[in-house]
Image: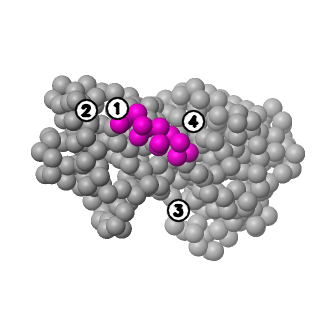
Amino acid sequence: MGKRIGILTSGGDAPGMNAAIRTAVRTALHYDLEPWGIYRGYHGLINGEMEPLTSRAVSGIIQRGGTILKSARSEKFMTPEGRAQAVDMLRQHEIDSLIVIGGDGSFRGALSLQEEGIKVICIPGTIDNDIACTDYSIGFDTAVNNVMDAVNKIRDTASSHERVYLVEVMGRHSGYIALYSGLACGADVILIPEVPYRVEDVCKQIQRAAELGKSFNIIVVAEGVKRIDGSQNSESPALQIGRYIERESGFETRITILGHIQRGGAPTVRDRLLASRLAYHAIELIYQGKGGKMLGEVNQVVKSFDLAYALAQEKQLNLDYYRLSNILASF
Ligand code: F6P
């Protein structure tokens, strides 16, 4: 067997991570490399929770959401001592290359390992799709389809009872989930962190929709939306906006906070293919002796970027989608 490669998943899980693990393991075996699974992200790495993965260990997982390697957020890894222990553990196990599947917090951790001489290759896996240098991250497509399924159901009851429904979706800093699902579901209003809102305007939009003859409304709200005046509290924004609309307009409102249901379920075809292609390229890079890279898919082509460079970029939300949704909702 050739050299050892560690594989870990970190941060919020994302459907398609298993498809990436499966491909990484089998492609590694194809190149006569020895894949090791590291459990519970950086937390498990520090504690030495790792073992070799066989081809059979990744059988029957391509269709499963979540991650067989488990995931965790590690506070200890944020400290220099924690990171030193992680490097020690890798050296003890003779692992000098590492594939990290996760979001930008996980990538920052990976960069610190790269600086200690571990060759890391990062694969974007987060439902938030907030990572630069890739059009999509693993899990996003499944998450927006989960939201779409839920909103389709909510529409049925919203139309029957002629109510205003506010659906709160994930995205503390990024409006991708809200914008894509809102546009795909025909939402009347979409609220995203990138465009601060005024609750009075949202209420007016709903009143105008009623004047246009709409008997029910769907408002999709990202959890991280911000008010224009900067006034913020920790209560769910959908709850606050819904309460305001009901009080000011008299329309009956209902709130659905979708929560972690968005992150679960069988990955879509898109997520499985994206995960498989990125993981395949990750092993190829390792086979070529490379490290300090992030892989992304740009215009359907898999590309590798310098990790430090990728982390310095900001992912831009395509606000054309936002303008389009406003046009569609205004008729
Ligand atoms: O980063 C992915 C994500 O699902 C975010 O959209 C969400 O804000 C957060 O994770 C929730 O984190 P946790 O699972 O720790 O509650």
The image's mark for residue 196 is none
Instruction: Say which of marks 1 and 3 sits in front.
Output: 1
Within-10-Å neighbours for mark 1: few <14, some 14–19, many 20+: few
Residue type, label 4: Gly
Q: Is residue 325 inside the magenta stretch?
A: yes
Relative to residue 75, is residue 157 depicted above or below? above
Residue type, label 1: Phe
Q: Choose between 250 and 107: the one closer to the eye.
A: 250
Relative to residue 269, is residue 131 depicted above or below? below
Q: Give the residue at mark 1.
A: 331
Q: Choose between 160 and 25: the one closer to the eye.
A: 160
Q: Earlier in the sequence, mark 3 or mark 4?
A: 4
* Gap between marks 1 and 3 measured at Cα: 48 Å
Q: Earlier in the sequence, mark 1 or mark 3?
A: 3
Q: Earlier in the sequence, mark 1 or mark 2?
A: 2
Q: Residue 264: x percent and y percent? A: 44, 37
Q: Residue 166: x percent and y percent? A: 28, 42
- What SS does tag 3 mark? loop
Q: Give the residue at mark 3.
A: 74
The image's mark for residue 212 is 2
User: Residue at (57%, 69%) from the top-left corner?
Assistant: 78
Relative to residue 212, is residue 71 depicted above or below? below
Instruction: Say which of marks 4 and 1 sits in front.
Output: 1
Within-10-Å neighbours for mark 4: few <14, some 14–19, many 20+: many
Q: Earlier in the sequence, mark 3 or mark 2?
A: 3
Q: Give the residue at mark 4.
A: 16
Magenta residues?
A: 318-331
